[in-house]
Image (tube, rainbow, N blue to C red):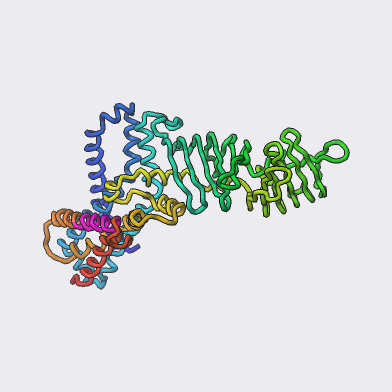
Amino acid sequence: MRLLDRYLLRELLLPLGVCLSGFTLFWIAFDLLGDMTRFQKAGLGPIGVLEFYLRGLPDLLNTTLPIGLLLSLLYTLTHHARHHELTAIRAAGISLWRTIVPYLAVGLLLSLGLYWSGEHLIPEGKRRQEHLLSGKSASQKPAELWRSQFHFENQTDRRSWSIGRFQPASGDMVAVRLLMPLGPGAHREVRIPSAVWTNGAWVYTTASERLWRTPDDAEPARRETRFTPIPPLPGTNLWLATAGPLQTFTNGVLKSNLVFREEAKQIDWSADAFDSRNGELTGLVVREPIRPGAQRQFLAEGATWTGSQWRFTNGNEYLFRNHQDREPLWLPGVESLQELNETPEIIRSELRIADFNRAKALQRPELTIQEILDYQHLHPVLKPDLKSWLETQLHARLAAPWTCLVVVIIAVPFAAPSGRRNLFFGVAGSIGLAFIFFVVQRVGFALGQNGLVPAWLGAWLPNLMFSLTGLTLIARVR
């Protein structure tokens, strides 16, 4: 880095720090006056209030950083121009574009930082602020944060969810009902009393399942189960029923034509071969009674023990209604109910979008990119108005962080021309430019969300307009 670059950065970072510090202190003081009663009701002490504002800083910077950068740039460049420093730099053979490279680098880094903050720090900060205001500790789950009677549909995987109660902070669920179509007229219903999200999967104790073969099926197949595709084997060792006593094969012997019966659950296992050296089974068949006369069969070409569960190759499940059933219900490719790929994050996005206030949404992008993509994955077919709204939110979230880079481009031609200007020119200029940018941003956002212009154009309109204007004016600076 050249000595000139270091000098320009030093002259910029000082007023930038002053601007951001001033904005932050003003915001905290103003907010404290209005929210002191709310903090008292929540029982927050000085440490809790401090944490509340620290969690809200990323969201505040998302708004104030572009304005602070614009103000500090106009102030700094006006100062350089007033003392003819920019004229001296250009007289030394350094072009204006090369001179502003440090400013462009700062704008780019701040834009990337705002993007990362908007996807990670801001959502988590808002959740933590809500938790603090609930008056509970971090380990507790306040009842007021539970959501009741929540419904949504996964159109991609053809699953309908009905959740009696959902805790967004932890992902806990109570009274879950799932409907899954299986074929023409056939469908499957699963009821889970409670479930928690842990280690990348839903964990629950018991579940009840009913399977309807036709829409008018009066006697659907029923079962109560731990909700695994087949009952788990007893550890990595396979207990085998032979002509003699039960024995365990743990010495690395390849055994063929195995038969095992789990007496407690009356489940029959058979396999063509088992290799205890790597825990692999081939030609697996499992038979489990569902109710008198009904049976469930699971067939797999191979199975491997991973240390905590069995992984199957080409697994298929068949459900027989009775001993004479010649057309069993077929569930292809069943491996585990990790088929439930709806994570707590996906459910949270459903909640936020379902509850979102449209009037508020017209003001600024409120949803994260991941929330929008999750919702679009579950709902590939959307109504035109909802599609325009979501796509505008998506593009606005992508466009908003780049405001810092646009600020650099627009500030240079307004402050770089030589001349003896008052230092307060930068302050007045920043206020005027920020106001125009704000108006264009709101107009474009509203047009995009209402489908009057393409979503990308409505969201990127202020960035495109100010960038093109700035580049044109920079080319004319003498």
- Residue farthest right in this picture: 244
Residue 279: give x, y in percent of width and height.
Answer: 73, 47
Along the line of sight, the residue nearer the viewer: 451 or 26: 451
Q: Is residue 122 inside the magenta stretch?
A: no
Task: Note whether residue 404 is visible.
Answer: no
Q: Quadrant of residue 112?
A: bottom left
Where is residue 38 shown, x and y percent of the image? 28, 30
Left/right of residue 165 with respect to residue 395 in the rendered view: right
Of residues 191 and 173, the one drawn nearer to the viewer in this rendering: 191
Q: Which residue lies at the image location 32% right of the left edge and 34% below the top edge?
A: 50
Q: Is residue 171 visible?
A: yes
Q: In terms of depth relative to the viewer, which is nearer, 256 or 451? A: 451
Does residue 440 belong to the magenta stretch?
yes
For the point 34% across and 31% down, the residue is 47
Task: Reply above or below: 412 against 171.
Answer: below
- Magenta segment, which residues? 436-449
The quadrant where residue 415 appears: bottom left
Magenta highlight: main SS: helix
